[in-house]
Image: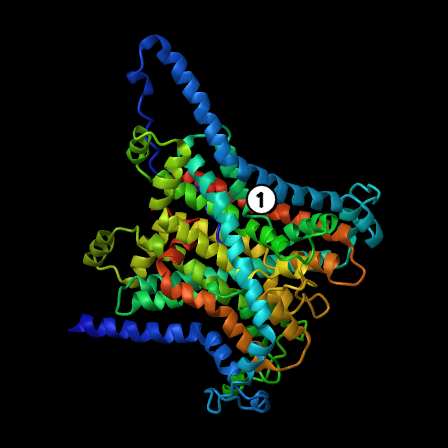
């Protein structure tokens, strides 16, 4: 998924032609006011469906989720809708749960390690593809594939590749003399396994954004630098990396927001297991709400709301950085 | 000619990198063609030397209804997204509505909300309304992934439409709605394609909403088809991977037919032109 925004630098629409010019001065004013009110109404009519939609299918589900996290739900009261209000009890339960610490830690490790590798690989590839060799455009397009595949496809393919007995990765390790790794079934490796798969999925996104950032760096800078005798590494360190900083900041922050909420991949590959060794806030929340025959909707929703808070912190940081760059 | 051979070296390295990156995709294809008895062979066959189509036959037998549902849900999500997002984008870009700035910010924040949280909220609502396990309930839920993105794309694109074009339509006597339909929409083709493409792909790929809201319905999407294959633990990995290959086809087709729109959508959030 990608986060889109309104490009504030896009040319503003020129003012509408002065209607008053055609009307006599006296009733021109009244006419203009009338027209302005009508155009406001028209604008609202165009926006109304979206506003209603957002209220019904964004605000209301979020409200329901908040409500869930503040009540003591059981399956019966969930259906009947008469669960008693319990304040912050669910949040307290969740914070005291022995799973909370590990889930939080795994979320952070998963997010930051994934992003570090995705960004490094994406940047290296972007610089590489910026050399404009033959087939560069085609190969760059092919790199998008992992990002476009349905997550269930990538997740199940990686599950089989990481299978401990018959997986191709262990076979590859075997050929270089490394003992087989019990990727998905060992608590030591489960988190690493889902990170590997997630890095693979995220590289294209980083590549595409960083590559288009590179297009904005003037070629003359490199020509001047190489005249001054700067080598490839010098050019990267003194020109590419500093000038790419704004785009890098945006890429990393967007990456943070996406990666924090990754659910499908981990759920399909490990369900957060074995024994919660790869559970993150997202999978734990789902596990609580839907993962067992005795759902704990309240605590599940509480974890979800904690996740929203964390995502919003990074999200608002992203918006700030974005705004400042445009100013 | 040093630089020519240098460039050729880049092409070779590029091909190698692409091969490494796409190895999982190749492996999915390879496994989908591997006979069941060779599945756990060691060493595994790196090439499908004895290809079998059992896996694909299983797809034809078991998965066609799921594929049909996914198509229905994908198309439904595209229609719903376009109907909501295109007029709103036009209003935000050209009509300067009161509260437009706030709405823009709200859309940005909306894109950051984790899917599982939305799924949980929807679950409660759909349970009340009796919408669980219905295909059109799933369309509504899936559209929440794409609508904010769609509005943003339309707004950005339509801001670039010259004001003269719209003014000319008005002078010809067209009202705002006519202007939108006969002038703005036709020139916004690129935005329409980008938004349709992504909303289809996201609805087609959705797993969270499907698993939460449509786990027991008559019409379940292909993502659940694959998930149940894995869950049933039938170990027929050629069938699982064959389904995965078929489920990847829309992505492949879109990449071939509409690559520049894909890149446009990815960068929409991050880079200024």
Position of A292 relative to A55 (above/below): below
Outermost residue to the front:
B173
Q: How many marks?
A: 1
Image-quadrant location for residue B94: top left
Outermost residue to the left:
B1
Seen at 37% across and 61% down, the residue is B259
Task: Answer with left or right where residue B92 lies relative to residue A213.
Answer: right
Seen at 68% across and 58% down, the residue is B133
Whole-percent x, y for residue B249 in the image: 47, 69
Position of B185 relative to A266 (above/below): above
Q: Label 1 lies in what chain?
A: A
Image-quadrant location for residue B232: bottom right
Whole-percent x, y for residue A127 in the image: 34, 61
Label 1: state its secondary structure. Answer: helix
Q: Is residue A113 visible?
A: no
Image-quadrant location for residue A231: bottom left
Outermost residue to the top:
A26
Q: Is residue B60 visible?
A: yes
- The residue beneath circle 1 is A313
Identify the image's colour scheme: rainbow, by chain, secondary structure or one colour: rainbow
Task: Answer with left or right where residue A130 lies relative to residue B94.
Answer: left
Give the position of the C terminus of chain A as an image quadrant: top left
């Amino acid at each position: 998924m990608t986060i889109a925004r309104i490009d504030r630098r896009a040319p503003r629409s020129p003012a509408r032609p002065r209607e008053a010019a055609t009307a006599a001065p006296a009733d021109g004013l009244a006419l203009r006011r009338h027209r302005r009110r009508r155009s406001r109404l028209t604008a609202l009519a165009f926006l109304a469906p979206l506003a209603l939609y957002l209220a019904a299918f964004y605000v209301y589900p979020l409200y329901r989720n908040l409500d869930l996290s503040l009540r003591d739900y059981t399956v019966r009261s969930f259906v009947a809708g008469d669960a008693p209000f319990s304040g912050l009890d669910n949040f307290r339960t969740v914070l005291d749960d022995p799973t909370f610490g590990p889930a939080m830690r795994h979320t952070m490790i998963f997010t930051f390690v994934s992003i570090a590798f995705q960004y490094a690989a994406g940047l290296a590839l972007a610089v590489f593809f910026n050399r404009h060799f033959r087939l560069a455009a085609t190969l760059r397009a092919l790199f998008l594939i992992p990002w476009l595949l349905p997550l269930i496809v990538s997740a199940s393919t990686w599950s089989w590749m990481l299978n401990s007995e018959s997986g191709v990765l262990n076979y590859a390790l075997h050929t270089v003399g490394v003992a087989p790794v019990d990727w998905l079934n060992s608590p030591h490796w489960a988190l690493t396994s889902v990170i590997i798969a997630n890095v693979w999925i995220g590289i294209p996104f980083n590549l595409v954004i960083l590559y288009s950032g590179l297009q904005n760096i003037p070629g003359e800078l490199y020509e001047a630098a190489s005249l001054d005798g700067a080598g490839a590494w010098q050019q990267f360190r003194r020109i590419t990396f500093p000038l790419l900083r704004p785009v890098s900041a945006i890429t990393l922050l967007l990456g943070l927001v996406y990666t924090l909420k990754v659910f499908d991949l981990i759920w399909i590959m490990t369900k957060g297991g074995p024994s919660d060794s790869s559970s993150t806030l997202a999978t734990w929340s789902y596990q609580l709400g839907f993962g067992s025959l005795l759902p704990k909707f309240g605590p599940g929703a509480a974890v979800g709301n904690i996740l929203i808070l964390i995502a919003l912190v990074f999200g608002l940081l992203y918006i700030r950085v974005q705004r400042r760059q445009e100013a | 000619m040093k630089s020519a051979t240098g460039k050729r070296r880049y092409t070779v390295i590029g091909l190698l990198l692409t091969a490494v990156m796409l190895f999982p995709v190749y492996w999915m294809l390879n496994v989908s063609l591997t006979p069941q008895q060779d599945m756990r062979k060691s060493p595994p066959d790196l090439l499908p030397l004895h290809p079998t189509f059992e896996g694909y036959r299983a797809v034809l037998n078991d998965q066609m209804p799921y594929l049909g549902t996914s198509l229905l849900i994908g198309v439904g999500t595209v229609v719903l997204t376009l109907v909501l997002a295109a007029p709103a984008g036009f209003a935000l870009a050209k009509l300067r509505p009161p509260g437009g700035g706030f709405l823009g910010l709200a859309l940005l924040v909306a894109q950051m909300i984790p899917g599982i949280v939305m799924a949980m909220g929807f679950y409660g609502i759909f349970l009340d309304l009796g919408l669980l396990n219905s295909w059109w309930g799933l369309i509504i839920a899936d559209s929440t992934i794409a609508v904010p993105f769609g509005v943003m794309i339309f707004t950005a694109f339509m801001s670039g439409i010259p004001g003269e074009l719209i003014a000319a339509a008005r002078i010809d006597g067209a009202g705002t709605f006519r202007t939108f339909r006969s002038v703005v929409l036709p020139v916004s083709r690129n935005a329409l394609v980008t938004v349709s493409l992504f909303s289809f792909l996201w609805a087609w790929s959705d797993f969270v909403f499907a698993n939460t809201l449509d786990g027991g319905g008559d019409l379940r999407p292909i993502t659940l088809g694959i998930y149940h294959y894995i869950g049933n633990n039938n170990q027929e990995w050629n069938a699982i991977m064959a389904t995965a290959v078929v489920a990847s086809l829309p992505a492949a087709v879109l990449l071939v037919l509409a690559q520049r729109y894909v890149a446009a959508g990815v960068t929409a959030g991050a880079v200024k032109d």
